[in-house]
Image: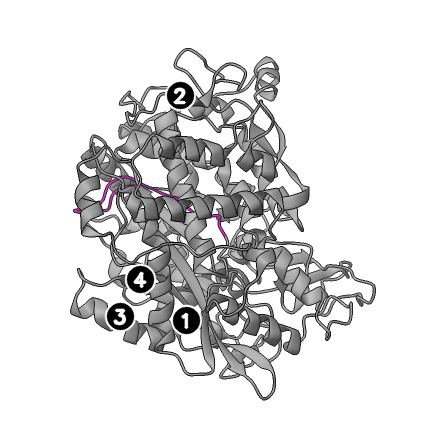
């Protein structure tokens, strides 16, 4: 969820009055932090995942499933181990937005040994078992992206009703009671209230309903003149969803910026591949993903900023919510693909430049800082800008983008990091581990083969919308770069006719050039845009991952080629290979995405009336089946394939670790 400062939350009026104070000091904190750490080098690869979970309570007599509002009590018990032995725990637990949600991470980051890829799934399984031991017999912890009947009548346990007319309510929602917001930290309700108040009205999340033969229009609660829209009116409908995220440490700032850029075009591709949320407020919708839902759920832009009124009280028209895809690449060689206008405060930008920050990074930070703080604590107003970074993190952590570029925390051994944020949570530990390991392996291939995935930011934005369409993984096409394999003498890379990937030289070296060169914002000419258009084309997800004839190598074959050049123990190789085969089948359409599987479960349920409605009974039966899949008691070949029994272990055998520590491993 981001920064969790402790203290007494200020009212919106008090927070608004201090917005400029937070900006000014946040910028100074970043400048100070940058200059202390810009030359940091040779950090080793460390990485870790974050899985968010929903606690579900079953009423087996009534055949009803509800979200269980027990997160605070669960976290108190789960955190006892960490308090007793911070260095020895195998998992860490943190609160999330929902009172029915928890977030689990590994106790320690994974490292550069390829054998660590064989530990991920076992650690995820341990986390699930650790929570399960604390639950009631009628409860279950589920790594599902969205609870299908979130916002329906009596969807919580205990049952609470929304209070839209209550002025003390944070959400004032017609559907989502305040009691469903995590009560153990004031940040969550404070964000809910302040985003609503800054916007000047409740958030409005609109999804097209899936129209079946008996679907009745208008949809219950649909906006005027939009009869086919499912309306969601609270932050909880987005921030109450679960996702799968991962963070990895780069060896230096240059590599971090490179990985940020190169992974950005992968974000919509991975969103489509992990699509897992087609049901909202008990309705089947035309969307397969949470992204636009969560983007709209924290959209605090005023009518002026959204372009609905002339600018008077606000400075900017802002194209996106503070939760959205990135707007610019960070590396000098990527700048020519920054073809979307970037809004930023000229004064903040100039202050960053005067403070020694290069053009692109100054532009990036100044763009983040067009946002107001929406959560501030009285104890955190006055800080030492030489030592603290909370004002910077206040704005940074409430810009929830597909990628996040993360400076090292002050006085820490942690290096420059990149966070990969688009993936939806999957049902099984096998799936979640497969996607985590794939992305981390891909970062190693990007660095080693010096791959180039860059396409214009406008095409990334287009792909983000395409990714959320119904069954996008199988039927849609995405803009992707044709020539991703480069040689030092080729600016636009190889084609597969130019070179065999067998001949690619693997290197762990990164460029240590000056990223602070004084460059103005690139403006593409028509001639260059025409040249760019030859660099990318529309591809299916299957082509991107599995390859395309002799013209595109495919991401999975490139990873396999990389692994052949490394020393991998047998068990880890077996596990990784199962992950790669699963991803290839998901990409080709041989296996369903979670979203498509959920749709099939609804459409084929005997209680479904072809009316787009997901009843309590349908919801109960689907979640019961998911529980059995998680436990390994039900096989679901259409979702997972025939074989997903990996050789994952919750530790690296000492003999392997001793041997591999002396070998050339992935950095």
State how far apart marks 4 and 1 are (Cα).
Answer: 18 Å
Frontmost of labels 2 and 4 is 2
Mark 1 vs 3, N-terminal side? 3
Q: Nearer the viewer, residue 57 or 311?
A: 57
Contact (Cβ within 8 Å) of mark 2 with mark 4: no
The residue lying at 53 percent from left, 83 percent from top is 159
- In the image as oriented, which residue stretches furthest toward the front? 570
The residue indicated by pointer 1 is: 182
Q: Nearer the viewer, residue 304 or 578?
A: 578
Pinpoint residue 272: horizontal percent, then vertical percent.
Answer: 57, 46
State how far apart marks 1 and 2 are (Cα).
Answer: 50 Å
The residue indicated by pointer 2 is: 504
State how far apart marks 3 and 4 are (Cα).
Answer: 24 Å
Mark 3 vs 4, N-terminal side? 3
Mark 4 vs 1, N-terminal side? 1
The residue indicated by pointer 4 is: 377
Q: Is residue 271 visible?
A: yes
Residue density around tag 4, few if under 14, some if 14–19, many if 20 or more, within 10 Å: some
Q: Residues in magenta?
A: 407-423
Mark 1 vs 2, N-terminal side? 1
What secondary structure is found at the residue carrying circle 3? helix
């Amino acid at each position: 969820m981001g920064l969790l400062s402790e203290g007494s939350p200020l009212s919106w009026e008090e927070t608004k009055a201090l917005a400029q104070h937070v900006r000014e000091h946040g910028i100074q904190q970043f400048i100070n932090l940058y200059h202390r750490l810009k030359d940091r080098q040779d950090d080793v690869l460390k990485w870790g995942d974050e899985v968010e979970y929903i606690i579900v309570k079953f009423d087996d007599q009534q055949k009803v499933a509800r979200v269980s509002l027990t997160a605070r009590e669960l976290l108190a018990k789960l955190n006892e181990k960490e308090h007793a032995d911070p260095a020895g725990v195998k998992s860490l637990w943190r609160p999330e937005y929902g009172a029915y949600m928890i977030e689990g991470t590994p106790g320690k980051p994974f490292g550069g040994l390829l054998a660590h890829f064989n530990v991920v799934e076992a650690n995820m399984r341990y986390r699930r078992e650790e929570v399960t031991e604390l639950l009631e017999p009628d409860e279950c912890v589920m790594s599902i992206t969205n609870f299908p009947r979130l916002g329906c009548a009596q969807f919580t346990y205990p049952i609470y009703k929304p209070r839209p007319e209550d002025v003390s309510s944070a959400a004032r929602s017609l559907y989502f009671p305040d009691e469903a917001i995590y009560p153990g930290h004031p940040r969550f309700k404070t964000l809910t209230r302040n985003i609503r108040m800054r916007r000047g009205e409740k958030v409005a999340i609109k999804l097209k309903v899936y129209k079946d033969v008996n679907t009745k229009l208008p949809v219950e609660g649909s906006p005027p003149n939009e009869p086919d829209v499912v309306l969601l009116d609270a932050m909880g409908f987005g921030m109450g969803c679960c996702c799968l995220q991962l963070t990895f440490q780069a060896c230096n700032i240059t590599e971090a910026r490179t990985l940020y850029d190169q992974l950005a075009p992968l974000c919509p591709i991975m969103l489509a591949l992990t699509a897992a949320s087609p049901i909202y407020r008990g309705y089947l919708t035309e969307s397969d993903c949470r992204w636009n839902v969560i983007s709209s759920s924290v959209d605090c832009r005023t009518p002026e900023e959204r372009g609905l009124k002339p600018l008077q009280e606000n400075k900017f028209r802002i194209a996106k919510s503070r939760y959205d895809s990135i707007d610019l690449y960070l590396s000098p060689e990527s700048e020519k693909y920054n073809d979307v206008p970037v809004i930023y405060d000229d004064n903040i930008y100039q202050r960053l430049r005067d403070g020694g920050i290069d053009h692109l990074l100054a532009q990036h930070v100044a763009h983040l800082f067009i946002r107001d703080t929406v959560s501030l604590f009285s104890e955190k107003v006055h800080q030492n800008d030489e030592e603290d970074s909370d004002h910077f993190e206040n704005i940074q952590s409430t810009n929830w983008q597909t990628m996040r570029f993360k400076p090292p925390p002050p006085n820490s051994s942690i290096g420059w990091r990149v966070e990969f944020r688009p993936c939806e949570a999957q049902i099984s530990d096998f799936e979640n581990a497969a996607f985590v390991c794939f992305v981390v392996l891909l970062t190693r291939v990007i660095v080693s083969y010096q791959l180039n995935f860059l396409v214009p930011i406008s095409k990334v934005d287009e792909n983000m919308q395409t990714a959320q369409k119904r069954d996008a993984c199988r039927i849609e096409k995405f803009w992707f770069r044709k020539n991703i394999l480069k040689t030092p003498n080729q600016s636009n890379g190889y084609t597969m006719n130019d070179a065999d990937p067998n001949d690619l030289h693997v290197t762990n070296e990164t460029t240590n050039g000056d990223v602070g060169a004084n460059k103005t914002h690139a403006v593409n000419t028509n001639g260059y845009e025409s040249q760019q258009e030859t660099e990318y084309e529309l591809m299916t997800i299957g082509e991107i991952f599995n390859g395309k004839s002799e013209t595109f190598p495919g991401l999975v074959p490139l990873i396999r080629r990389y692994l052949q050049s490394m020393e991998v123990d047998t068990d880890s190789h077996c596990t990784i290979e199962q992950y790669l085969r699963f991803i290839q089948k998901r990409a080709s359409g041989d296996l369903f995405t979670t979203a498509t599987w959920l749709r099939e479960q609804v459409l084929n349920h005997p209680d479904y009336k072809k009316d787009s409605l997901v009843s309590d009974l349908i919801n109960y039966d689907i979640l019961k089946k998911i529980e059995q899949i998680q436990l390994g008691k039900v096989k679901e070949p259409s979702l997972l394939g025939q074989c997903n029994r990996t050789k994952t272990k919750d530790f690296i055998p000492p003999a392997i670790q001793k041997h591999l520590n002396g070998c050339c491993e992935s950095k």
